[in-house]
Amino acid sequence: MRDGVAPSYLWLPEGQWSGMLAFLVERYPQISAAQWQDRMARGEVVSGDGTVLGPDSAYRRGMRIFYYRELERETPIPFQEAILFQDEHLLVVDKPHFLPMTPGGRFVQETLLTRLKKKFDSTDLTPIHRLDRETAGVVIFSRQVASRGAYQSLFQRREVHKTYEALAPALAGRDFPFTYRSRMVDGDKFFLMREEEGDANSETVIDVIERRGDVNLYRLHPHTGRKHQLRVHLASLGIPIVNDAFYPVARPCKDDDMSQPLQLLARAIDFIDPLTGEARHFESRRTLG
C-alpha cells in the first residue's frame, strides 16, 4: 500500500508486443509513454515476484504485473467523514456527500477508502456495502479478513435493516406508508438504471416523516439493494429526489460543482451481530436540507 492505495494488477493476455512499454501504451492509451517510463524509472511497475519492469522488459502471456494508479489532477473534496463506531472487526463511518467510496475514474486519494486506510494505516480495510458518491450517511467497513465473510453474509441474506431519508416533492393520492415494487434493469447508459415490465426485483417501503412546504422528508426502507433503487423509485412516482442529476432525466455533468448535494441520506443501519449476537444500531448525525 502506498499513500493509502493498494497497487492495481493485471494478468497479461495473449498477444505479441515488442516490450512492456509498447503493451502498456496500447492497453492504456490515456496514459502517455512518457508517464509509463517515469513510473518504470521509479520502480513502480513490477512483476508478481517483485522484479522491477522496464520499457524493454519481455512481454510474457500469463504474467501478472503490478502498478499504481496516478492522476495528474484530482479534485479535493472539502467535506469530512466522521467515525461513528470502531472495534477490532468493524469501522462504521458517516460519509459526506460527494465523496466516492473507493478509487476509480477521477478519484484515487479523494475517496473514503483511501482516507481511512491512511488514517488507520490498514491494508485490510474493506467496505462491506457501498453508497453512491452523491449519497451521504452510514457505511460499514470490515477491519479483518477473518470475520469479513460473517458480516458480508448478513447483506447477502438481507438480514440488515437499512433506513434512508430523502427530500422530494409531496406525493398526493397515497396513504402512507406504502410499498413500491418494480422491475429494475440496466439503462441505456452504463451509469443509469430503468424500469421495465415484468416480475418485480426491487421493493421500497415509503413513509412521510414531515412536510416542509412543497417537499416532504421521506423515510425509505429498501427491502432490496438494486443500484440507484431509491432514486429510481421516487422518480417513477413523479417525485424525484431534490438535486438528483440522474433521474428522471440525466442532466449534464456538474464536474466539480458541489453546491447542490443530492438530498438522500443513509440514516441508519440495524442488524444482529453474527459474532456476538448483539443488536447493532448505527445512525448518521447528518441532516438534509
Image (tube, grey):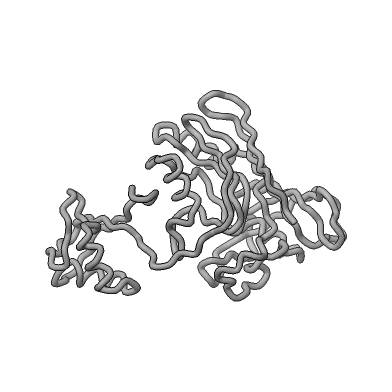
Picture coordinates of residue 88, whole percent (x, y): 47, 30
- The residue lying toward the viewer, choosing from 289 and 24, is 289
Residue at the spot x=63%, y=61% of the render? Answer: 198
Q: Is residue 243 left or right of residue 152?
A: right
Q: Is residue 73 left or right of residue 55?
A: right
Where is the C terminus found, in terms of image quarters? bottom right
* Quarter assignment of residue 13: bottom left
Q: Is residue 257 left or right of residue 34?
A: right
Query: How many numbered marks, from 0 up?
Result: 0
In this rendering, the answer to whether 143 lies above or below 186 is above
In this rendering, the answer to whether 16 lies above or below 123 is below
Picture coordinates of residue 118, whole percent (x, y): 42, 45
- The residue lying toward the viewer, choosing from 130 and 83, is 83
In this rendering, the answer to whether 248 lies above or below 45 is below
Q: Is residue 90 left or right of residue 252?
A: left
- The residue lying toward the viewer, choosing from 281 and 228, is 281
Picture coordinates of residue 267, whole percent (x, y): 68, 45
Residue at the spot x=60%, y=25% of the render? Answer: 278
Picture coordinates of residue 233, whole percent (x, y): 69, 59
- The residue lying toward the viewer, choosing from 197 and 178, is 178
* Quarter assignment of residue 162: top right
Residue at the spot x=49%, y=39% of the render? Answer: 152
Residue at the spot x=78%, y=53% of the render? Answer: 217
* Quarter assignment of residue 38: bottom left
In this rendering, the answer to whether 224 lies above or below 190 is above
